[in-house]
Image (cartoon, grey):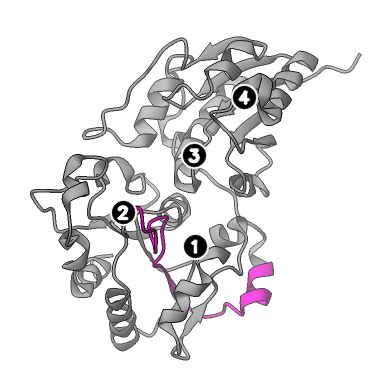
C-alpha cells in the first residue's frame, strides 16, 4: 500500500498582498510536519498564479463566490470532496470573517484552527498582518524558527527574464498602480498622482544611472500610457509578466517604489530595498513586512487625520492631501538612505 502524505489546507482567499503575507506560515508548517506533507491553498481567481513555481504548494482551489453557501458553490464543494477522498490533517483558516465557516465545519480534518471555532482578531493599529496570521498559527504550533516565519515566495528561472526583457544593467522598479487606481468608488485614495510619479522618474533619470521598469497588471496597461513617450532608460513591462516573473525581476532590483498594493508586498518578500508610499491606510499593518532580509521605508506625511481608511473620515475627505501633497523629493530622499 502506498503511503499518502499528510495534507494541510490553508484558507487565505485575499488579494495578492494578503496572500503574500500569509505565506509566512508555510515554512513553520514544513518545519513541524517535515517535507512529507501536501499543502493546499484556497485563493481568489488569478492569485493562484503566485504559486506556479512554488513546489511547497501542491494544489490550489480558486473561489469565485466566497459568500455563496457550500452546497450551492461548486468551488467550495471541490474542497469537501477532496477531504472525503483523503481527510486533511490540518485546516488553517487565516480568514477572520464568516465566509468560510461552512467549508471549515464540513471539510474532513483532524485539526481545525481559526474561524468558526475561534475568532482571533487583529489589532489594526499595533500589529502587522503577518504577526496576526502567525498568532493564528500559534494556536496549533508555537515552536519554530522565527527567522523563517516571514513572507516567502518563489519566482521563475531568472535566465528566462534576461532573454525576455533584455535585463543586463542595474535597474529600479516603480509600481504606480493599485486597486484604487481609476476606481470611482474609492476615488483613488491610495493612489499617488501620476504627476508625482513623473516627477520621481525625472529625478531618478537625472540623479542616477539606473534604468527604470514600470510594472503593473494587464488590466492597468491603459494607465501606463500616461507615462509615454518613454525615455530610452524607462521600460514599460505592465501586463507582460506573470507573477513568478515579477517576483524574479523584483528580486534583482536595486530598489522598488510602490503604493499600498500587492506589488509592494511581492517586493517586500524578495527585494532588499523597498519604499512604500502610504496615505490613508495604516502602514503599521499593511506596509510590506520588515524582516531580517529587507529594508522597508515608508513615505508618509503622518497627518493627524491618517490613517483614515475604512472610517467615516475618509468618506468626507475631498482633497486626499495625504497623497496629493507627498512630494517626489521626499520619496527620493528615502531612496538615498539605502
Magenta span has 311? no
Assess whether mark 3 and mark 4 are in contact (beta carbons under 8 angstroms): no
Taking depth in this image into account, of 291 and 91 the one nearest to the observer is 91
State whether residue 238 is above or below residue 2.
below
Provide the secondary structure element on which disc 2 rests: strand
Determine the residue positioned at 70% across, 23% down. Answer: 77
Q: Quickly name the residue at label 2.
A: 296
For marks 4 and 3 on the same chain, the one whose residue lies earlier in the sequence: 4
All told, the count of numbered labels is 4
Residue at the outermost left position: 304
Determine the residue positioned at 61% across, 80% down. Answer: 166
Residue 303 seen anywhere in this rendered image of the structure: yes
Assess whether mark 2 and mark 1 are in contact (beta carbons under 8 angstroms): no
Q: Position of residue 323 (x, y in %)?
A: 22, 62
Determine the residue positioned at 34% across, 80% down. Answer: 201
Q: Is residue 275 left or right of residue 217?
A: left
Q: Quickly name the residue at label 3.
A: 14
Q: Quickly name the residue at label 4.
A: 9
For marks 3 and 2 on the same chain, the one whose residue lies earlier in the sequence: 3
Q: Which portion, as a residue range, is magenta?
A: 160-185
Residues under labels 1 and 3: Cα distance? 21 Å
Taking depth in this image into account, of 243 and 65 the one nearest to the observer is 65
Amino acid at each position: 500500500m502506498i503511503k499518502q502524505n499528510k495534507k494541510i489546507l490553508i484558507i487565505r482567499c485575499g488579494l495578492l498582498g494578503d496572500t503574500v503575507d500569509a505565506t509566512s506560515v508555510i515554512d513553520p508548517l514544513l518545519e513541524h510536519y517535515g517535507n512529507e506533507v501536501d499543502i493546499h491553498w484556497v485563493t481568489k481567481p488569478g492569485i493562484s498564479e503566485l504559486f506556479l513555481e512554488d513546489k511547497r504548494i501542491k494544489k490550489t482551489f480558486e473561489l469565485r463566490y466566497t459568500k455563496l453557501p457550500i452546497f450551492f458553490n461548486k468551488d467550495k464543494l471541490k474542497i469537501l470532496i477532496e477531504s472525503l477522498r483523503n481527510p486533511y490533517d490540518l485546516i488553517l483558516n487565516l480568514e477572520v470573517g464568516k465566509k468560510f465557516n461552512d467549508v471549515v465545519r464540513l471539510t474532513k480534518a483532524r485539526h481545525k484552527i481559526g474561524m468558526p471555532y475561534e475568532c482571533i482578531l487583529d489589532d489594526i493599529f499595533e500589529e502587522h498582518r503577518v504577526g496576526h496570521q502567525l498568532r493564528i498559527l500559534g494556536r496549533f504550533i508555537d515552536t519554530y524558527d522565527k527567522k523563517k516565519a516571514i513572507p516567502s515566495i518563489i519566482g521563475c528561472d531568472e535566465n528566462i527574464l534576461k532573454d525576455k526583457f533584455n535585463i543586463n544593467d542595474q535597474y529600479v522598479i516603480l509600481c504606480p498602480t493599485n486597486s484604487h487606481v481609476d476606481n470611482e468608488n474609492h476615488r483613488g485614495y491610495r493612489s499617488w498622482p501620476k504627476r508625482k510619479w513623473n516627477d520621481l522618474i525625472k529625478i531618478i533619470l537625472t540623479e542616477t544611472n539606473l534604468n527604470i521598469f514600470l510594472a503593473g497588471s494587464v488590466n492597468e496597461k491603459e494607465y501606463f500610457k500616461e507615462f509615454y513617450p518613454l525615455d530610452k532608460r524607462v521600460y514599460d513591462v505592465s501586463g507582460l509578466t506573470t507573477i513568478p516573473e515579477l517576483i524574479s525581476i523584483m528580486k534583482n532590483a536595486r530598489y522598488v517604489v510602490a503604493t499600498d498594493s500587492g506589488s509592494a508586498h511581492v517586493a517586500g518578500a524578495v527585494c532588499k530595498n523597498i519604499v512604500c508610499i502610504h496615505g490613508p491606510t495604516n502602514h503599521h499593518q499593511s506596509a510590506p513586512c520588515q524582516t531580517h532580509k529587507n529594508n522597508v521605508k515608508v513615505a508618509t506625511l503622518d497627518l493627524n487625520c491618517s490613517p483614515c481608511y475604512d472610517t467615516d473620515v475618509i468618506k468626507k475627505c475631498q482633497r486626499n492631501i495625504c497623497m496629493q501633497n507627498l512630494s517626489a523629493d521626499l520619496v527620493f530622499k528615502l531612496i538615498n538612505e539605502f
